[in-house]
Amino acid sequence: MRGGWVYILTNRPNGTLYVGVTNDLVRRIFEHREGEIDGFTKRHRLTQLIYFERHDEIVRAIQREKTMKHWPRAWKVGLVLEMNPEWRDLYDEIAS
């Protein structure tokens, strides 16, 4: 099985958060940015990639995403701050 990615999107620093999972991070974030995916992320304009982590197996990534979705917001913010204290949009770093 191929690996996967867990990621967090926002619309602004300290804004709304969305936790997602994918097997192709660049493609999936591009889809969010272009508004190709109807639903929560499009409705709230969540286009800024602020956190991601790689997993060797997609099933582990899916489980991690499910776990993180149940975390309090403060825990998710803590993850972001560890990796990305300025809340920069990391898309350009992964897309190049």
Image (tube, grey):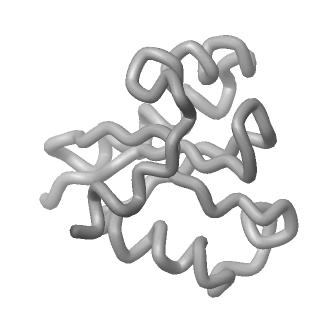
- How many labels were placed on the picture? 0
Instruction: Give left or right: position of 80 versus 53.
Output: right
Q: Where in the figure is residue 27, as x and y percent of width and height?
A: 37, 76
Q: Give the residue at x 70% y 36%.
A: 13
Q: Where in the figure is residue 59, as x and y percent of width and height?
A: 31, 46
Relative to 77, residue 52 above or below: below
Q: Give the residue at x 43% y 32%.
A: 64
Q: Where in the figure is residue 7, as x and y percent of width and height?
A: 46, 46
Q: Give the residue at x 73% y 45%.
A: 12
Instruction: Give left or right: position of 45 versus 49.
Output: right
Q: Where in the figure is residue 28, as x and y percent of width and height?
A: 44, 71
**Front residue of this view, candidates 43 and 96:** 96
Relative to 14, residue 4 above or below: below
**Front residue of this view, candidates 63 and 91:** 91
Instruction: Give left or right: position of 55 versus 87.
Output: left
Picture quadrant where residue 68 is located: top right
Residue positioned most to the right: 43
Image quadrant where one finds the N terminus: bottom left
Picture quadrant where residue 87 is located: top right
Q: Give the residue at x 41% y 59%.
A: 91
